[in-house]
């Protein structure tokens, strides 16, 4: 069994997309690394992950995904492939 070693990123659905986008960029100081229609990805300085926060315009404020890192890989044949993210 694998053990969770860290949270890699969190994806949120947000009603007020532009206000949340501004908050993560200006108040938290995260760097916008990619954006699409109603989607944006942010990274933090000094971290090797492509992104640590993903925002998605939504009809409700929700946590849509939490991605974890593990101490080893474990594969399941029935597992769905990860959601793609543009890499800049």
Image: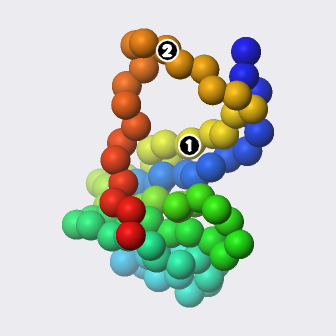
Tell me which corner region of the image, top left, top right, bottom left or bottom right, holds residue 19.
Answer: bottom left
- The residue at the point 56 percent across, 87 percent down is 26
Tell me which corner region of the image, top left, top right, bottom left or bottom right, holds residue 40.
Answer: bottom left
Residue at the disc numbered 1: 66
Q: Position of residue 64 (x, y in %)?
A: 45, 44
- The residue at the point 63 percent across, 39 percent down is 68
| Helix, strand or loop at mark 2 | loop
Q: Position of residue 14 (x, y in %)?
A: 40, 60
Disc assigned to residue 22: none
- The residue at the point 42 percent across, 20 percent down is 79
Q: Position of residue 88 (x, y in %)?
A: 38, 70
User: Looking at this rendering, what residue extends furthest in the left direction?
Assistant: 37
Whether label 1 touches label 2, CB < 8 Å: no
Q: How many marks?
A: 2
- How far apart marks 1 and 2 lie (CA) works out to 18 Å
Tell me which corner region of the image, top left, top right, bottom left or bottom right, holds residue 52.
Answer: bottom right
User: Looking at this rendering, what residue extends furthest in the bottom direction?
Assistant: 26
- The residue at the point 22 percent across, 66 percent down is 37
Marked residue nearer the N-terminal end (1 or 2): 1
Quadrant in the picture for the N terminus: top right
| Helix, strand or loop at mark 1 | strand
Answer few, some or many: residues within 10 Å of disc 2's Cα (few below 14, many 20 plus, some between 14 and 19).
Answer: few
Q: Is residue 62 left or right of residue 72?
A: left
Residue at the disc numbered 2: 76
Is residue 44 in view from this perspective? yes
1 vs 2, front mark? 2
């Amino acid at each position: 069994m694998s053990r969770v070693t860290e949270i890699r990123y969190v994806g949120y659905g947000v009603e007020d997309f532009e206000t949340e986008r501004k908050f993560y960029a200006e108040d938290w100081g995260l760097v916008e690394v990619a954006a699409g229609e109603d989607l944006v990805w942010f990274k933090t300085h000094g971290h090797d992950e492509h992104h640590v926060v993903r925002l998605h315009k939504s009809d409700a404020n929700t946590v849509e995904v939490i991605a974890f890192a593990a101490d080893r890989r474990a594969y399941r044949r029935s597992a769905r492939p990860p959601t793609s993210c543009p890499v800049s």
